[in-house]
Image (cartoon, rainbow, N blue to C red):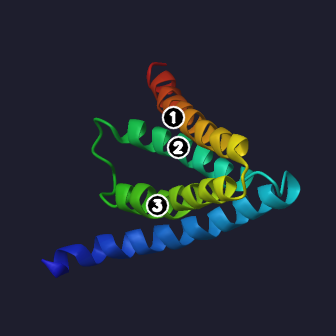
Amino acid sequence: MMKDLLIPTIWVFFGGGVGSVFRFWVASFFQKNVSLQFPYGTLTVNVVGSFIIGVIMMYMAGRQPGFPFWRQLLVIGFLGGFTTFSSFSWDTISLFRNHESGAALLNIGANLVMCLVAAWLGSLSVSMFNNQ
């Protein structure tokens, strides 16, 4: 049993490490260059990650991937390390604790709506290319 998990675990480990580094770079860039008051870095990685998962999952739907590790590497590993739901949660709690309820509610709404739309657009973009 453990032998069967070894190779997928390596792909998840590698993808998660790379995704975490990319999350750090993207979130840091947006926090530094856009706003220190609102968690735009977290919002950005959540929206981008949602778009990417929409693309990957729709592309892989109904296909036998060329390499069986793509889902483990990209979806579970990379996107698991890249997206930041726990950061989103803490950012929101921090805004509430700092009596910034409006910003907290905006953060909840923006992450929810924008990430769902991004995942939908990602999947739609693959559907459009497949129909050509």
Left or right side of 14 for 117: right
* Type of amino acid at the residue the image marks with label 1: Leu
Q: Position of residue 88 (x, y in %)?
A: 58, 55
Q: How far apart are marks 1 and 3 (CA)?
A: 16 Å
Instruction: Name the foreground residue: 22 vs 101.
Output: 101
Q: In which quarter of the image is residue 64?
A: top left
CB within 8 Å, label 1 to label 2: yes
List the single residue furthest toward the left: 1
Q: Provide the residue designation for mark 2.
A: 50
Q: Quadrant of the N terminus?
A: bottom left
Relative to 105, say whether 26 is above or below.
below
Residues marked 2 and 3 touching at CB (< 8 Å): no
Q: Which residue is drawn at 66% across and 46% down?
A: 104
Instruction: Tell which circle, 1 or 3, labels the residue nearer the N-terminal end.
Output: 3
Residue 96 in the image, given as x and y percentages of width and height: 65, 53
Given this view, does label 1 or label 3 mark the residue nearer the observer? 1
Is the Cβ of the residue at disc 1 closer than 8 Å to that at disc 3?
no
Count the numbered circles shown: 3
Secondary structure state at the residue bearing disc 3: helix
The residue where tag 1 is placed is 116
Would you call the spot at circle 1 few (<14 residues within 10 Å), some (14-19), or many (20 or more)?
some
Query: Picture quarter containing residue 118?
Result: top right
- Mark 3 Cα-neighbour bin, 10 Å: few <14, some 14–19, many ≥20: many
Report the front residue among 44 and 67.
44
Label for residue 80?
A: 3
* 10 or 118, nearer to the observer: 118
Residue 111 makes an appearance in the image: yes
Tell me the number on the disc at residue 66: none
**Mark closer to the observer (1, 2):** 1
Q: Nearer the viewer, residue 88 or 5?
A: 88
